[in-house]
Each structure stands twice: as structure tokens, then as C-alpha cells.
Amino acid sequence: MCKSVVQGRGLPWLATACVAFAPAAHAEVTVYGAVDATFDSVKSTVSANPGGSASVSRVNSNSSLVGFKGREDLGNGVASVWQIESGVGVDSGGGTLGTRDTFVGLAAPWGTVTLGRLTGPARALGGLMDINRGATGIAANTALLGKLGNLPLGDPFTKPFASLVPAAAGEGVTQQQIGPFDNRWKNAIAYQSPAWNGLSAAALIGMVETGVGDPATDHRAKGYDLGLRYDMGAALFAATYTVLDTGASDSAPTGYSAFKKLSDWRVAAIYRLGGQSRVGFLYEEVSGDFTANAAGGFAGRELTQPVWYLSGVWDVGIGRVIGQYGQARKMRGLPDADGSGANHVAVGYEHDLSKRTLLKALYSRIDNGRNAAFDYGIGSVGGVGQDASVRGVSLGIRHQF
């Protein structure tokens, strides 16, 4: 029986996914997962109105999950592979089947092809570069990555590609605010190459199943996500390029989408210092090409925002000190771009109780510019205003099985 370590944002391209199988044609099912619960105390305060702050204390489920996966040998080096993975609400119960990476496909010496709800190369790279076990919680780099000033999270077309997930009914707090490049693709087909002397490639096409009868939006939307990785052992380099074409023409109403296209490219490097110690750097530029009808409120037809993160993990006894610092730079294309960026600092300690169980303590803070309102990607506060300071502490336990 083969056992695996499950990460919060992973694909075979950037995270090892180990499946169990029996000899010959007989297949077995592996049950796996992670239970990750923290006590969070988070707060958002606008400097101009400190009395109007939003404060939340809660137990957060982070990226708790349960999954089933398997592999069947079909002969001649070919195998069928499948996975059904679901999020679990540890804090309040509930969950929906197949909400995470869920697929069926074929694996062969020439690579692996899968179909389903899938993590693309951009999301996988963001997860690889994050310093938190499982790439989850208030300290995760989804606070700034891929959000373009949060505009795609509110756009009529692109917001379903993002992750804007409310808490349980009546709680009134949004628990996830993740941009479209760091969420999973629906209706997707992906190819993962084998590694050639450390070099591997991945490609994903998203079949955006939106049919509309408006002549202004008469062609179907589409998306694709491409990635390259070169792993030298001590060092790793990776790059991704992602495009989401909404299908909107210049005359399309803003009620359909303000964007003709969203694109994102990322480059990253990791240097491994031994054990789990490492340093890493990730740079991205996310761009939005507006329709003519939506461009009136902007200085140009395109809006671009660079984002970067510097991260580090340091082994300390039977635990790790973790930290990362990121900046969303001011957006190009705004009439008033000053104050459209934000800074994010996160530090913490993860203490191993065993190979599968750890304790963690984290501090995370976002400082928004006067025209920015970034929030945590996972475990967000909700209702964050422009010029707000978002800060929080998190104490919890994570068990993988």
C-alpha cells in the first residue's frame, strides 16, 4: 500500500501524488485527507475610522479535505487513474462531493491526461511557493496573488472562476477570496508530461460552458493554462502563463463582463538549503483587457498589476520557522494609480508532533493602500474597506492521513 502527503494546491506537476495499486488488473482505492482546524482572531481597521473596524474570532476549517483515488494497470505501461476529492467543514460541518481536484484519466510513459475539475499550472505554482503546510490559512499567498485589485471577484463573468465563498448561513462572513488564477478549473482537460532530465511541462484547457444568445457575446469563452518546470535538485525554476477569454466583444454590455480577457504570467525559483529549509521568490503580472464599453473609467484599455513574494522556511529542531513578504504594486491603467497596491507579511512556526500531525502558530498582516482593499485569500475577514489594515493570529493543529 502506498501512502501520500496531500498539499492544499497540488498537481502531479508540482506536488507528488502517490496512488495505491495491486498487481495485475486488480485495483485498490486509497482513502486520504487532511483535517486542519485553527482558532483565528482577525481584524480589519481603516486608519481614517479606527472605530469602524471589523473583528472576528472563529474556528476555521482552512483546507480540510477527504479524498478517494486509485490506479489500475491496463498493460503495456498504461494505467487508468482517478480521484474524487472533497472539502470538509471541520468547524461547522457540511461539504460537497467533488469540490476539489476530481478527475479520471490515463497515465502512460508519454505522460498523463486527465479530465474533470482540475488544478492548473498557475495555481499549482502558487501553492508550491507558499510556505504554509497545505498552502492554506490566513498567512497564505492567495492574499495578493492573481486578484488585480479584486476586480475579477466582482465581475459578472469572471467571479465564478474566482472563489468567493461565504460562511455558513447567517454568519455573514466571507471565508474565501481567491482570484481566478488560484482556483480550480471546471470542465477541464489537462496534460502532464514526464520529466526529461528534470524538465517537465503541463497544459490545461478549460471548456467554459457558457452559451449566450446576445450578438455581442456570440462566441464561447475559453481558457488555457501552461507551465514549465526545471528541477535541478538543489534549485527549482518554474514559469506559467494563463489566459481567460470571456468571449465579450467591445460592444458587450458591462452586465455581461467588463473584461475581454484576463491573463497572468508567473516565474518562480526555489533554492533548497537542506532538510525542509528553503528560500523562494515568485513574481507575477496579472492583466485585464477591458471592453470599449467598460474602459471609460480607466486611463487605458488594459489594467496590469505586478505582484511578488519572497518566502523562507527554516528547520528548527522538530519544527520550522516560516515567513513570507509580498507586495501588490500599484496598477498600471488607473487614472489614480497611487495607493492601489498592498503589502502582506506572514510569520509563523510549525511544530511536528509526528510525521502526520503538527501544531502551528501564525501572524499575518495586510496593509492596503488608500485605493486598495485586499483581504486574506483563505479565512478572509470580509467587508474590508480601502486603506484598511487586515491583521490576525492563528493557532491550530493539522493532521494528514
Image: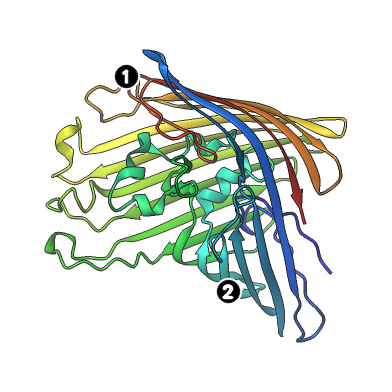
**Image quarter (top left, top right, bottom left or bottom right) of the N terminus:** bottom right
- 400 vs 290: above or below: below
Residue drawn at (61%, 45%) of the image: 62
Q: Amino acid type of disc 1?
A: Asp
| Residue in front for this viewpoint, 162 or 112 | 162
| Residue in front for this viewpoint, 1 or 273 | 1
- 305 vs 256: above or below: above
Q: Which residue is mark 2?
A: 104
- 32 vs 75: above or below: above
Relative placement, left or right, of 311 versus 291 is right
Tag shown at residue 235: none
Q: Let me know if residue 367 appears in the view.
A: no
Tag shown at residue 338: 1
| Residue in front for this viewpoint, 320 or 114 | 320
Query: How many C-alpha atoms fall within 10 Å of the one at disc 2: few (<14), some, or many (≥20)?
Result: some
C-alpha gap between disc 1 and disc 2: 47 Å
Q: Position of residue 271 (x, y in %)?
A: 70, 35
Describe the element under mark 2 as helix, strand or loop: strand
Residue drawn at (57%, 39%) of the image: 268
Q: Position of residue 106 (x, y in %)?
A: 61, 76
Relative placement, left or right, of 352 versus 372 is right
Q: Quadrant of residue 294?
A: top left
Q: Quadrant of residue 38?
A: top right
Relative placement, left or right, of 252 versus 378 is left
Q: Let me know if residue 372 appears in the view.
A: yes
